[in-house]
Image (cartoon, rainbow, N blue to C red):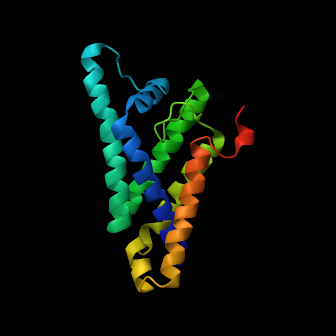
Amino acid sequence: MDLATASLTVASVLLIVSGPHKVVDPAPLIEFLVGVGVPLRSDQRLGRVRSWLGRSIGVFEIVLGLTAVLLGGTTTAGLVAVTYLVFAALVMLAIGRGVGSCACFGRSDSPPTVLHVVIDLVLAAASFAAIAADTPLAVIDADSFGFGGVMFVIGVGVVVGVIHAVLDGRFPRSQRR
């Protein structure tokens, strides 16, 4: 199994999983962006623009994640990496400004943490490393979706699930007060 490809796949699937939450309910994301200092005025006339912005970010995440998983390529891997660097920078700002939620998965009660920054930076580095790697489908296809392909899919799924639980504030519970 290609570790770089698996890491990029994890980063991409997390984008695919987090995007729909922002499309359905962009409010937590908009609150997060305002909290970190993005100048989004709150008058009623701009309410639709704010919703459109939040939904557009969600669509971007979904499309980028799907493109990375299905098509791969150096540009796509680079975009995934840069996206996670932006996430890390925004989370660092959120921590510094005392923002109460990272809004990653649409919940408004998931606090941004240093662990969140570390995960984003690791995913960015892994995505940069995957620029020269095979695409996820190439790794699976090279094994004719035999045991190695199954393990690739299961491994990615487990890692995505754990990262999702950590970033969403569900695991480990001992960190929540």
Front position in the image: 121 or 19:
19
Classify the position of the C terminus by image quarter: top right
Q: In this view, does 121 lie to the left or right of 72?
A: right
**Horizontal and vertical percent position of residue 125:** 53, 58
Task: Kindly identify the residue that appears in the image at 56 percent across and 31 percent down.
Answer: 109
Q: Quadrant of residue 117 in the image?
A: top right
Q: Does residue 136 show up?
A: yes
Q: Is residue 142 above or below residue 34?
A: below
**Horizontal and vertical percent position of residue 60:** 32, 47
Q: How many labels does the image show?
A: 0
Task: Kindly identify the residue that appears in the image at 38 percent across and 22 percent down.
Answer: 39
Q: Is residue 65 above or below residue 35?
A: below
Q: Quadrant of residue 21 in the image?
A: top left
Task: Kindly identify the residue that appears in the image at 49 percent across and 48 percent down.
Answer: 85
Q: Does residue 122 show up?
A: no
Q: In this view, does 36 lie above or below 174?
A: above
Task: Kindly identify the residue that appears in the image at 43 percent across and 49 percent down.
Answer: 83
**Horizontal and vertical percent position of residue 68:** 37, 62
Q: Which residue lies furthest to the right in this view?
A: 174
Q: In this view, does 47 lie above or below 90?
A: above
Front position in the image: 54 or 21:
21
